Image (cartoon, rainbow, N blue to C red):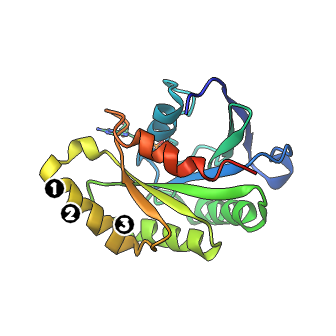
Amino acid sequence: MKVTEAELVISAVGQDQYPNDDLPEIALAGRSNVGKSSFINQLIQRKSLARTSSKPGKTQTINFYKINNMFYFVDVPGYGYAQVSKTEREKWGVMMEEYFDTRQSLKACAMITDLRHPPTKDDVQMYAFLKHYELPVVVIGTKMDKIAKGKRASHLQQTIRTLQVGTDDTVIPFSAETGEGKKEAWRMLSQYMNH
Ligand code: GDP
């Protein structure tokens, strides 16, 4: 897909701030620092529209990026930062539930994992959380450029096995460095961009 317009419409802290133009939404989830912003920026060909690295302590927001006036990428707060306080974790949970529980226009989720390592406990929980909402999930196994070609298939299998990825979902090996997997990611996500 050629992205001609990409705009951060709102960084929402609550439901009343979500956009109300009813465009389809694709959520983007992932552990803090996994490469989520790099994924968005590579897909939409912007150097730094999505702010990289949401550090702990920063206000957690749900960021709505309107793409081509056609759909939203919805960047939800990262998870799994060891240093965050219990209060912050609770806030994260409330925010996630508020969005995932009620959002009619939410069509699918791209969940970013680090293909170099087996998915963490947090990743496993996140995938289960998304499936609890019966949401189609496209798992993006990023940083594939860091893995020797001959080892990529086994890393992929390990991701599928550990997350218990269902037959309806896919794992796409991806690199924000080289752009590998980008076409496939667009192809998979495009099917959820129609009303
Ligand atoms: P976020 O916190 O999940 O948004 O993570 P960022 O997009 O800021 O990425 C975290 C770090 O990983 C940065 O230093 C990126 O340059 C690096 N990174 C992200 N994606 C890739 C990738 O596909 N390959 C490599 N080699 N590094 C990556």
Q: Is residue 157 visible?
A: yes
Q: Which amino acid does label 1 sit on?
A: Lys
**Whole-Å distance between the Cαs marked 3 and 2?**
17 Å
Q: Which amino acid does label 3 sit on?
A: Thr
Crowd band around label 2 with a 10 angstrom C-alpha radius: few (<14), some (14–19), many (20+): few
Q: Name the residue under label 1.
A: 151
Pointer 2 residue Cβ closer than 8 Å to ligand 1: no
Q: Which of 166 and 49 is in front in this view?
A: 166
Q: Is residue 184 above or below residue 92?
A: above
Q: Quadrant of residue 151?
A: bottom left
The image shows residue 89 at horizontal and vertical percentages of 58, 63
The image shows residue 101 at horizontal and vertical percentages of 74, 68
Q: Which of 175 and 9 is in front in this view?
A: 175
CB under 8 Å between callouts 2 and 1? yes
Q: Which amino acid does label 2 sit on?
A: Ser
Q: In which quarter of the image is residue 3?
A: top right
Q: Which of 167 and 8 is in front in this view?
A: 167
Q: Name the residue under label 2.
A: 154
State left or right for residue 33 relative to residue 162. right
Mark 3 or mark 1: which comes first in sequence? 3
Q: Name the residue under label 3.
A: 120
